[in-house]
Image (tube, rainbow, N blue to C red):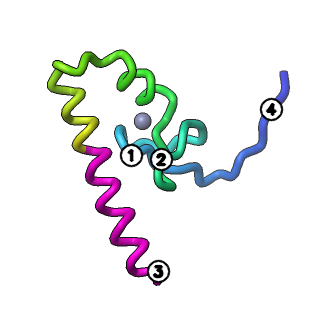
């Protein structure tokens, strides 16, 4: 069994707040595999979907602020 070496730090998942090493990146933020799955499976009428969308919109605002600071 092959062991993959990763940095020990990992990244904090935007949705669940846990440190994960795999997932997708949106605006330099990690969304882990399990959260991606949850989002995909969540019906748009479900209150949880709004929760996820809300998290994502917060991310966009945060990222914009960070960009301003960098410049
Ligand atoms: Zn997650």
In the picture of the structure, the residue carrying the numbered disc 4 is: 3
Q: CA distance from mark 3 to mark 1?
A: 21 Å
Q: Is mark 2 within 8 Å of ligand 1?
A: no
- Across and down, in percent, residue 63 comes to 38, 63
- Name the residue: 72% across, 46% down: 6
Q: CA distance from mark 2 to mark 4?
A: 26 Å
* Gap between marks 4 and 3 measured at Cα: 37 Å
**Residue 39 picture location, percent across and down:** 36, 25
Q: Earlier in the sequence, mark 1 or mark 2?
A: 1
Question: Which residue position is annotated with label 1?
Answer: 14
Q: For mark 3, does the 10 Å Cα neighbourhood hold few (<14), some (14 to 19), or many (20 or more) residues?
A: few
Q: Residue beneath label 3, please?
A: 70
Viewer-nearest residue: 20 or 56:
56
Highlighted range, magenta = 55-71
Q: Quadrant of residue 62?
A: bottom left
Q: Could you tell me which residue is drawn at 48 percent across and 47 percent down?
A: 26
Q: Is residue 57 left or right of residue 6?
A: left
- Callouts 1 and 2 close, C-beta under 8 Å: yes
**Residue at image coords 30%, 18%:** 42
Q: CA distance from mark 1 to mark 2?
A: 9 Å
Please, is residue 38 above or below residue 55 in the view?
A: above
* Tags 2 and 4 touching, CB below 8 Å: no
Residue 44 picture quarter = top left
SS assignment for the magenta stretch, majority = helix
On screen, residue 33 above or below 12:
above
Quick one: label 3 or label 1, which is nearer the N terminus?
1
> Where's residue 47, x and y in %?
15, 25
Residue furthest to the right in view is: 2
- Would you name the residue on which mark 2 appears? 26
Q: CA distance from mark 1 to mark 4?
A: 26 Å
Which residue shows up at 35% across the image and 40% down it? 15
Magenta stretch holds residue 56:
yes
């Amino acid at each position: 069994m092959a062991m993959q070496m990763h940095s020990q730090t990992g990244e904090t998942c935007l949705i669940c707040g846990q440190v994960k090493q795999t997932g997708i990146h949106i605006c330099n933020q990690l969304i882990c595999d399990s959260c991606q799955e949850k989002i995909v499976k969540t019906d748009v009428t479900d209150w949880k979907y709004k929760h996820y969308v809300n998290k994502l919109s917060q991310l966009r605002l945060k990222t914009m602020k960070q960009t301003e600071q960098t410049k």
